[in-house]
Amino acid sequence: MSIIKESLKKNNLIRKIYSKSDKMFFLILAKYFPVIASKYKYKKMTGKKLNLKNPQDFNEKLQWLKLYWQHPLIVKCADKYEVREYVKSCGCEEVLNELYGVYETTSEIDWDSLPSKFALQCTHGCGFNIICDDKSKLDKNETLEKLNRWLKIDYSLVAAELHYAKIKPRIICEKYIETDAGFLPNDYKLYCFHGKVHCTMVCTLRSKGHPLLDFYDRSWEIKLLYDEDNLLSNREIARPKSYEKMIEVAEKLSKPFPFVRVDFYDFNDTAILGEMTFTMAGCAIADFTDEGQKKLGDLINLPPKIKS
């Protein structure tokens, strides 16, 4: 092993080959042996051994749910298009963002019919987003290249998140949400356990590329030291005017699940749903404090297993 490490340090080509083979090894594990893949990646990302027999903290319980509680409703709600039908069935259609179109291929996108500002995203994973604030300046060739590449990705293999394999890859185009000053709005992520909101993580300065994270309790009265970023912070974030509506909707949508994070924006004092997320950071969140891991983990009562 020491010979390999020395070679990696000295030779860029060898390093690239080794890195590529390591990635391929994990993709094979994730596809055919998701439990082993999860243990492997968890150790690599957190430095800890994954306890699936008696999971205790937040990460471990999310890993258990990811692997052993494969409820079909998770697939529907993680799908950024199909979730709209679920939201409507819960009587919460008013929080849905305006939808301009849904496309199975990039050739279906009618660019002329789109407004000057819009948001494109793929339905079957995370990070597949293109925010366009001026269509006249959009590099369409680069956009099409990205979208076509993303549509081919099996996102379930990134961190053995099995539900993503069952989501049909599509593209949706929605209304561009911005503040009065023209900036990206704050992102309010409500952590829901067994149908109850416990806390909210608010992401600010999203347009800077590295958003700041702050946790507040359900009533937005106490800051919770759940994230390392909080430990260094004395900032206070104003409670959004639509917060009560966010809580109301989040608790309706989260009722069937041991855990789900329901994300919103506040647009003109109105709650707009972002997405529903079940497996943040591949269930290996590295920047939560020990207190956050324990308290959030304690809120999850693991259900009987469901295997698809």
Image (cartoon, grey):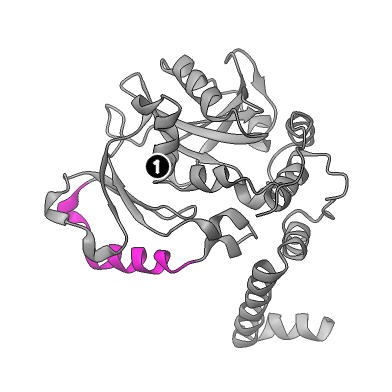
Name the residue that disc number 1 marks: 207
Quick one: quadrant of the C terminus?
A: bottom right
- Asked if residue 288 can be seen in this view, the reply is yes
Q: For this rendering, which residue is in front, 71 or 119?
A: 71
Residue 131, magenta (yes or no): no
What percent of the width, then of the height, locates residue 101?
A: 25, 48
The quadrant of the rendering that contains the N terminus is: bottom right
Q: In the rendered view, tell whether residue 147 sits above or below residue 80.
A: below
Q: Nearer the viewer, residue 291 or 273?
A: 273
Q: Is residue 301 above or below residue 281?
A: above
Magenta stretch encompasses residue 140: yes
In the rendered picture of this protein, how many numbered marks are placed on residues? 1
Residue at 72% across, 57% down: 45
Q: Residue at x 43, y 69 (%)?
A: 152
Our reading of the magenta stretch's main secondary structure is helix
Q: Is residue 181 left or right of residue 10?
A: left
The stretch in magenta equals: 134-153
- What is the crowding at mark 1: few (fewer than 14 residues within 10 Å), some, or many (at least 20)? few
Q: Is residue 59 above or below residue 245?
A: below
Could you tell me residue 70's position as x and y percent? 65, 49
**Relative to 118, 293 lies left or right:** right
Q: Residue at x 66, y 28 (%)?
A: 194
